[in-house]
Amino acid sequence: MSRLFFGTPEGIKEGQKFPDRKALIAAGLHRSTMHGIDGNGNEGVAAIVLSGGYEDDIDWGDEIIYTGHGGNDPQTGQQIADQSWQDHGNKGLVVSKLRNFPVRVIRGYKHNSQFSPDSGYKYGGLYNVVDHWEEIGKSGFTICRFKLIKADKILDKESDEVKEGVVVLVEPLGKDSKWFSIGVEPPESLQAQRLSSDSTFAKKLIGKKPGEVIDFGNGFKVLEIKRYMSD
């Protein structure tokens, strides 16, 4: 197998489509026809394929919550055993986080996301692993989780603010928090309410940073801002 290459191969463009895994290999995007993670625990991970193999994956476009390798039924996508941090792919993603290596993200037609192609595979660009943790997944087994952010969308948290095209989690004072999208159709997985960018509430939110409270009704606190790539 060829040596790991980090970054986008020469001549390949973000959004470019490929008919199958062999075409991905020929383009230098991914080196395996079977595995989703292209890398190892020593060098890191150069690429991942999102192909609907794991039920806990979440895809917001510019931000991805990725389930590591292992313990799933390839036929159903359900977890049937715990995952391990000793798995070479999971260790590799941790290495990429620690060394700030870019990871190529490729979406397959079986991946349940509005950003996936109808057929074949689509190159989604470069992402960085910014966090990792473990949790109990939908099927009751321990899974390794990774948060990836589009490389050109990573912002300093202190400068991150609400603007048109993002989704924002706000907490009405004394009530449960809720997601809102500003001027774009929200990702289905968030069940967010869309706000027109011209609405009074949206205008109050725009420019605010996490932790700030807006003067609207009884008050709303901005809890989190997610980078979101709309169609």
Image (cartoon, rainbow, N blue to C red):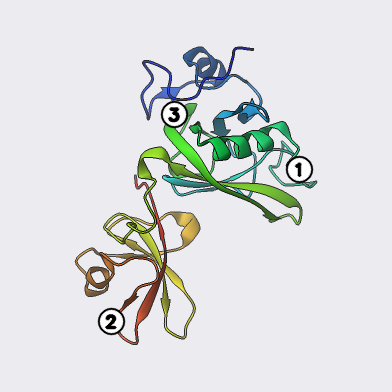
Q: Amino acid at mark 3?
A: Tyr
Query: What element does badge 1 sit on?
Result: loop
Query: What element does badge 3 sit on?
Result: strand
Which residue is at a point 64% across and 12% down the rendered structure image?
1
Q: Position of residue 36 (x, y in %)?
A: 62, 31
User: Gap between marks 3 and 2, in whole Å?
Assistant: 42 Å
Residue closest to the eye, 214 or 97: 97
Image position of 174 with respect to 231: above or below: below
Instruction: Report the residue marked by disc 1.
Output: 84
Q: Residue furthest right?
A: 81
The crowding category of the residue bearing disc 3, from other C-alpha atoms within 10 Å (few below 14, some 14 to 19, many at least 20), is many
Instruction: Report the residue marked by disc 2.
Output: 215
- Choose top left, top right, bottom left or bottom right for residue 203: bottom left
| Residue 230: assigned label | none
Which residue is at a point 19% across and 66% down the rendered structure image?
198
Q: Is residue 110 visible?
A: no
Instruction: Report the residue marked by disc 3.
Output: 123
Instruction: Give the mark nearer the N terminus: 2 vs 1.
Output: 1
User: Gap between marks 3 and 1, in whole Å?
Assistant: 28 Å
Residue closest to the eye, 133 or 205: 133
Which residue is at a point 46% across and 33% down the rendered structure image?
118
User: Gap between marks 2 and 1, in whole Å?
Assistant: 46 Å
Q: Amino acid at mark 2?
A: Asp
Q: Is residue 49 visible?
A: yes
